[in-house]
Image: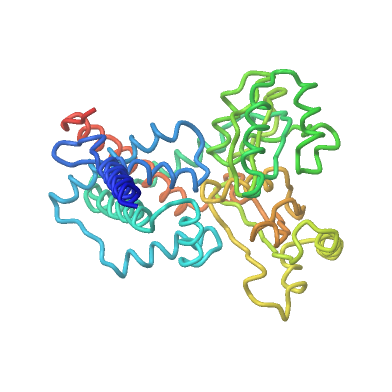
């Protein structure tokens, strides 16, 4: 008994040492920015946050760069006494969660399931909001926009002799949590394909979209239909090449480039996109799909959806007008295939329990005749402020001592 007791004590000591070592490892500095430390815990948390946001690419490198920039920004803002009140931060957090159609407690729970502490989100949001306000205040006097600037920008929009169109194959693999690992493995294999026949065969086997019936083949579409973050990825492809897996809520998207061409008709990237999302029970069950088909047959415009949704809770119908960059990737990819008045019901929410009946209402400001000068003014101001902020950040980086 005495020997057993001694062994138990020794085991407990080693467990304590192991736990202590793990804890110390989490607070170990991995980067220093002047006298400010970034710990392993912060880096791990930022990577998890990026994973929760379905950010593509090398997440370790992206997280390191973002945390370094946050330290540089915070250091500069501290010099000017910039801060954010708890009330303002709370409003920003709630607004951020609202973009995902979630309340803040719901969004916090989703992050917790991914191992993300709420304080990580608070730090991410607070630095972003303070920096945005700081840049506006610091450079406001340096940004002057004349009527000639606005007229020139509008004229340049109208001067495009053609538009670029792309011919793509598409696959979206359903990836609910219980099948996420298998979906990623399949997506990794597909991303290495270079044969049209192989990609189309894969589309018929694994794609969750109706286009799987013809191997995922799409017709010619303006590149402007796609969200900016995906547009850049597509334009980097060679013919036959496949994108890296693009994570979207409960799914993974892949595109293969079949061709590009210059179309004869001029077109401008939409300033904003108006769409409606009508949420139906049942997900992609037979009953849910039948209900969506009935709605499709009864509506011609987004306005018709108000009649369909009458006497139902207000939250079942969500109509928005957003800049393309503000639309979530999965919704933007669906809208890219639609003309005004067309619908899709390929997306789900609430872990597949709710079907999203999506309808494109309009792509706004496609030509110079209906471009709002105030919108152009704000776009020019935003571009110039961004350029000044980027230059400031580069100066801060050059002046800082960053290790490693």
Residue found farthest to the front: 1
Decide: is 195 above or below 139: above
Give how far across and how far down residue 12 sits, in percent. 31, 49
Residue 14 horizontal/vertical position (percent): 30, 43
Which sits in the foreground, 134 or 49?
49
Relative to 150, 385 lies left or right:
left
Task: Work out whether 134 lies above or below 243.
Answer: below
Q: Taking the image as drawn, is residue 1 in sight?
A: yes
Q: In this rendering, is residue 51 above or below 360? A: above
Could one spot residue 143 in this view of the protein? no
Residue 96 is left or right of residue 193, and the answer is left
| Point 81% across, 37% down: residue | 212
- Residue at 64% x, 26% y is 191
At horizontal 18% and vertical 45% (from top left) the residue drawn is: 76
Quadrant where the C terminus sits is top left
Residue furthest to the bottom:
311
Residue at left offset 79%, top offset 32%: 217
Image coordinates for residue 326, horizontal then vertical, percent? 52, 50
In front: 59, or 75?
A: 59
- The number of numbered discs placed on residues in the rendered structure image is 0
Q: Position of residue 108 (x, y in %)?
A: 45, 61
Q: Nearer the viewer, residue 282 or 267?
A: 282
388 left or right of 337 in image: left
């Amino acid at each position: 008994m005495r020997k057993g007791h001694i062994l138990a004590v020794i085991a407990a000591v080693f467990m304590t040492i192991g736990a202590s070592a793990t804890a110390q490892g989490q607070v170990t500095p991995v980067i220093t920015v002047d006298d400010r430390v970034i710990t392993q815990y912060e880096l791990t948390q930022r990577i998890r946050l990026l994973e929760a946001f379905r950010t593509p690419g090398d997440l370790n490198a992206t997280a390191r760069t973002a945390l370094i920039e946050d330290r540089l920004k915070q250091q500069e803002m501290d010099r000017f006494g910039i801060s954010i009140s708890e009330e303002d931060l709370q409003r920003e957090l709630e607004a951020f969660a609202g973009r995902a159609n979630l309340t803040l407690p719901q969004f916090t729970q989703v992050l917790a399931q991914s191992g993300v502490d709420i304080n990580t989100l608070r730090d991410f949001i607070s630095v972003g909001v303070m920096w945005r306000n700081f840049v506006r205040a610091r450079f406001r006097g340096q940004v002057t926009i004349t009527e000639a600037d606005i007229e020139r920008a509008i004229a340049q929009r109208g001067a495009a002799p053609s538009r670029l169109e792309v011919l793509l194959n598409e696959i979206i693999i359903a990836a609910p949590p219980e099948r996420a690992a298998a979906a990623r493995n399949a997506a990794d294999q597909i991303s290495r394909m270079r044969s049209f026949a192989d990609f189309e065969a894969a589309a018929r086997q694994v794609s969750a979209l109706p286009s799987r019936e013809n191997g995922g083949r799409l017709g010619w579409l303006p590149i402007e239909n796609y969200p900016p973050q995906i547009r850049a990825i597509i334009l980097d492809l060679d013919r036959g090449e496949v994108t890296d897996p693009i994570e979207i809520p409960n799914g993974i998207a892949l595109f293969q480039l079949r061709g590009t061409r210059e179309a004869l008709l001029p077109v401008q990237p939409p300033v904003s996109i108006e769409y409606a999302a009508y949420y139906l029970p049942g997900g992609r069950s037979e009953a849910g799909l039948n209900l969506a088909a009935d709605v499709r047959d009864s509506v011609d415009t987004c306005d018709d959806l108000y009649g369909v949704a009458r006497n139902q809770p207000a939250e079942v119908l969500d109509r928005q007008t957003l800049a393309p960059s503000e639309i979530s990737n999965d919704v933007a990819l669906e809208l890219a295939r639609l003309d005004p008045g067309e619908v899709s019901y390929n997306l789900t929410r609430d872990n597949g329990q709710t079907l999203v009946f999506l309808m494109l209402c309009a792509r706004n400001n496609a030509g110079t005749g209906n471009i709002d000068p105030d919108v152009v003014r704000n776009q020019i101001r935003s571009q110039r402020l961004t350029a000044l902020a980027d230059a400031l950040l580069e100066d801060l980086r050059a002046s800082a001592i960053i290790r490693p």
